[in-house]
């Protein structure tokens, strides 16, 4: 099944951006915990939240038209 979207590039950017933000957030959080740096942990958690939000927006946009629409 092929999904067609008029703004396909935007969906790709949200998906890749979300995955990269989650990856960076995990790494920053781990480094912050290792070196006991509160500011690094906060930045890492913010990246995790940003990545989750981007992926959620992408999924909501994809499911907006329905499975056969």
Image (cartoon, rainbow, N blue to C red):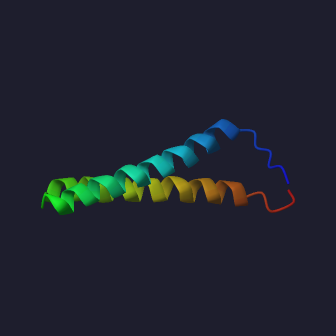
Residue drawn at x 22%, y 59% as measured from the top left: 41
Residue lying farthest to the front in this orientation: 34
Residue drawn at x 27%, y 59% as measured from the top left: 29
Q: Which quadrant is the N terminus positioned in?
A: bottom right
> Which image quarter: residue 12?
top right
Residue lying farthest to the top in this orientation: 9
Q: Is residue 19 above or below residue 10?
A: below
Q: Which quadrant is the C terminus positioned in?
A: bottom right
Q: Is residue 10 left or right of residue 69?
A: left
**Residue 38, image x, y percentages:** 15, 59
Residue drawn at x 71%, y 60% as measured from the top left: 63
Q: Is residue 52 above or below residue 4?
A: below
- Report how many numbered discs are placed on residues in the image: 0
Q: Is residue 49 left or right of residue 3?
A: left
**Residue 64, image x, y percentages:** 72, 59
* Nearer to the camera, 11 or 69: 11
Residue 46 appears in the picture as rendered = no
Q: Is residue 1 above or below residue 11?
A: below
Residue drawn at x 82%, y 62% as measured from the top left: 67
**Residue 2, image x, y percentages:** 83, 49
Residue 34 appears in the picture as rendered = yes
């Amino acid at each position: 099944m092929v999904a067609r979207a008029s703004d396909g590039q935007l969906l790709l950017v949200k998906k890749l951006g979300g995955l990269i933000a989650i990856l960076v957030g995990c790494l920053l959080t781990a480094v912050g915990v290792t070196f006991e740096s509160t500011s690094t942990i906060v930045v890492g958690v913010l990246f995790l939240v940003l990545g989750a939000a981007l992926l959620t927006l992408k999924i909501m946009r994809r499911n907006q038209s329905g499975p056969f629409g």
